[in-house]
Image (cartoon, rainbow, N blue to C red):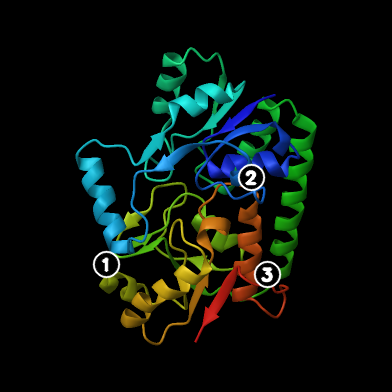
Amino acid sequence: MRIASLLPAATEIVGALGLADDLVAVTFECDRPEGIRATRPVVVDTALSAGLTPGEIDAVVRERAARGLPQYELDRDALRDAAPDLVLTQDLCRVCALPESTVTEALADLHLDAAVLTIDPHTLDEVLDAVAAVARAAGAPDAGTDLVAGLQDRLTAIDQAVRQRPRPRVLALEWVDPPFLPGHWVPAMVRRAGGEPLAGIDGGRSVATTWDRIADEAPDVVLVAPCGFGLDDAVAQAGAVREHLQDTPIVAIDSASYVVRAGPRLVDGIEAIAHALHPEVVPAPPPGRIRALS
């Protein structure tokens, strides 16, 4: 099957299922399986300029949304040439990826008779369901069953490790300028890692807040997980948090890989957060995933 993945999480899922050879098109953000972006046509790119600060990105996204402009650009010619049998897309967040409506319109205009699977998980359980759905659509249901079972086993191991531990109050931030509280599966990730999430919205959208409201929550730990950014950028952006919460422990995480992407590595993220909160009972993750800041 020829698979066009227009969503980094979907590309990661396809790779984890052992179907990377079936990928015929990806996005500019697809980095799992490793090296996939260099060996497949890139059919989705961002409309944002490189090198913007979090505040500048927020301003550009708001301005483009107000004008009805897309946040992403679809290379229709490259998609036509890829001739996919299956297209994986999303309709959860127009800021995070190309919306489904753009994809279906393009397929019709290009006269491509491809099946379309829209992946819109809002919760951690729905992410696991999405893994199984991709496997079924790609003709590999057994691989999906095995992958989900392995992820569930790892989650159960974390549950058992932290069950009797005190649960620190964790305030996760998906953006720092302005500060945004998390939604979707992020509160569940903190909970499964042995923390008590503060002010997040299970299964809902992330929402803007203020530093005064954050201080009023009196968190035991702040988890800096800026959407789309890796560990080094999360560490740098933690400086804005330190200005407002000088005495609160801060943990920075590679959010782009392990928090905001609705794929198998969310379990890696939960393991990393669990170690940060409970280092006595949860093994340290590989370097480069999470960092406690003094």
Q: Residues within 10 Å of mark 1 (few under 14, many from 20)?
A: few
Q: Position of residue 186 (x, y in %)?
A: 50, 56
Q: Residue 1 shows which numbered tag?
A: none
Q: In the image, 203: left or right of 66?
A: right
State whether residue 56 is above or below residue 152. Answer: below
Few, some or many residues within 10 Å of mark 2 (<14, 14–19, 20+):
many
Whether pointer 2 and pointer 3 mark residues with C-beta atoms closer than 8 Å, the reply is no
From the viewer's perspective, is residue 80 above or below residue 61? Answer: above
From the top left corner, tell me how far across and down residue 97 is, in percent.
44, 41
Q: Mark 3 highlights which residue?
A: 162
Q: Which residue: 65% across, 56% down?
A: 267
Drawn side of residue 236 relative to residue 281, left or right = left
Mark 1 or mark 2, whichever is nearer to me = 2
Label 2 or label 3, whichever lies nearer to me, is 2
Disc 1 marks which residue?
210
Comparing 166 with 77, the one in front is 77
Query: Horizontal and vertical percent for residue 232?
Result: 50, 71
Q: Residue sitting at 78 percent across and 36 percent down?
A: 143
**Count of labels in the image:** 3
**Left or right: 66 as drawn, with respect to 111:** left
Image height of 2 relative to 208, above or below: above
Residue at point 63% right, 49% down? 32
Q: CA distance from mark 2 to mark 3?
A: 36 Å
Q: Which mark is residue 36?
A: 2
The residue shown at (44%, 14%) is 108
For marks 2 and 3 on the same chain, the one whose residue lies earlier in the sequence: 2
Q: In the image, which is nearer the foreground, mark 3 or mark 1?
A: 1
The amino acid type, in three-letter code, at marker 2 is Ile
Q: Amino acid at mark 1?
A: Thr
- Based on the displayed image, in which of its 4 quarters is residue 191 positioned? bottom right
**Distance of mark 3 from mark 1, alpha carbons?**
31 Å
